Amino acid sequence: FYAYGLTVTTVILVIMTISFAFYRDPALLARARQPELDLAKGLRSTWPLVSCVVAVHNEEVLVRQCVASMAAQTYPNTELIVVDDASTDNTPAVLRELAKKYSITLIELPRNHGKKGALSAGVLQAHGTIAAFADSDTVWARDALEVAVPIFIADDDVGAVSGHCRALNGGTNILTRIQDSWYEGQFSVRKAFESVFGAVTCVSGPLAFFRLSAIYNFMPAWEADTFLGQEFRFATDRTLTAYVLGGGYLGPRVLPRHADSPFAQPKYPLRDWKIVYSKSARAWTNVPSTFGGMVKQQVRWKKSFIRNVPVTGRFYWRRPLLPALFYYVHVAFVIFGPFVAARHLIYLPLRGDPMSMLLYLAGIAVIGLSFGLAFRHENPGSRRWLYRPLMSLMSTVIFSWLIFYSAATIKRMTWFRG
């Protein structure tokens, strides 16, 4: 138990040190290496076509903002593909209205396929060399594509780029402020650490860029993912990321099962790509504003984690030593964390040692405070960093236990975004 506490502290210290000392935004590096990639210099016709794809299901309230932000990109060479995944509310009418206003390829699926199936239908119609995915409750910064695309141009080894994301409704109440402060650290600290090694483990859905040649072969395997004998609709972002990171290893093991798929031709060479994170490519996504919504979302994320470990865990040891070591240590943290919490919060106080509970919670708060200070560093003048310790305490006292419920109900595929 003491080794666990020491390891957690050491890992977080190393991650933060490397993030702040060594991370450099690959978008800024790309511009520095190739200054002619400035749109103002008249090279627009030579920029690659980007296929912007969003899957929508019953999102009539926020989808206008989402599609408008994608259509308003300053990057000039794009196509916008919107896939309605058999919505049952007013979403189809809203999308048809938007299709009259913007240049949109609208695909209306007759039955619900889930996010992966809907995005696959969009990619099948794509003509670009880069695919940019958005969640349907997300708003992109106007220059998101202009920032991210040069990364692919400057480095042929980059297969995917994860953008930066914050809470769109972060000011609604204390719960959304807590989540907003947490989002900042998940991107600007944790993804930045992995990006230093070109080994980001999750290209998050709100703003996800993929080289089409890195994902095209794997779309049918991703769409038809099964776990414990049935379709698995979660692990959307992590699993597609895994196919990019470990395509050379996973390809021969999964592609033969999908030889009859429309994606089978043309075949792209299988390889392990670099994946990086760009802090300056920004988006904002809607987060749950109720405690019940947070719990449901946490359950979905933990089911995705459980499913993805056998995928990414099979090959991630092949990546650079430090992120690989920390990946497997993090898996151990998730599994053993609830037992450590139970010892300090229940067992030792019942044995007459209440001070252990106070010291444990204080330690968790200090870790949260360190991420809060990182938030303050990235967002000077904002007081939202004060909420970050509350997320650490909630994760330890409440959310960590949900790993067991998630495992017990992993076959229940109820979707909740928030």
Image (tube, helix red, strand yellow):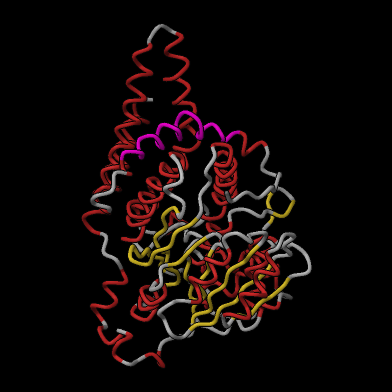
Question: Which residue appears at 33% of the width and 66% of the height?
Answer: 280
Residue at 67% in and 73% down: 121
Quadrant of the image for the N terminus?
top left
Is 198 on the left or on the right of 100, as rendered?
A: left
Q: Name the quadrant containing residue 264.
A: bottom right
In percent of width and height, residue 390 lies at 39, 34
Q: Nearer the viewer, residue 27 or 55?
A: 55
> Left or right of 359: which side holds 109?
right
From the viewer's perspective, tell me whether residue 102 is left or right of residue 223.
left
Front-most of 219 and 32?
32
Which residue is painted at 66% across and 36% down in the image? 408
Please check the rendered image and state whether residue 398 is part of the magenta-colored stretch, yes or no. yes
Q: What stretch is highlighted in magenta?
A: 386-404
Q: Main secondary structure of the magenta part?
A: helix
Residue sitting at 38 percent across and 54 percent down?
A: 187
Number of numbered markers: 0
Viewer-nearest residue: 235 or 199? 235
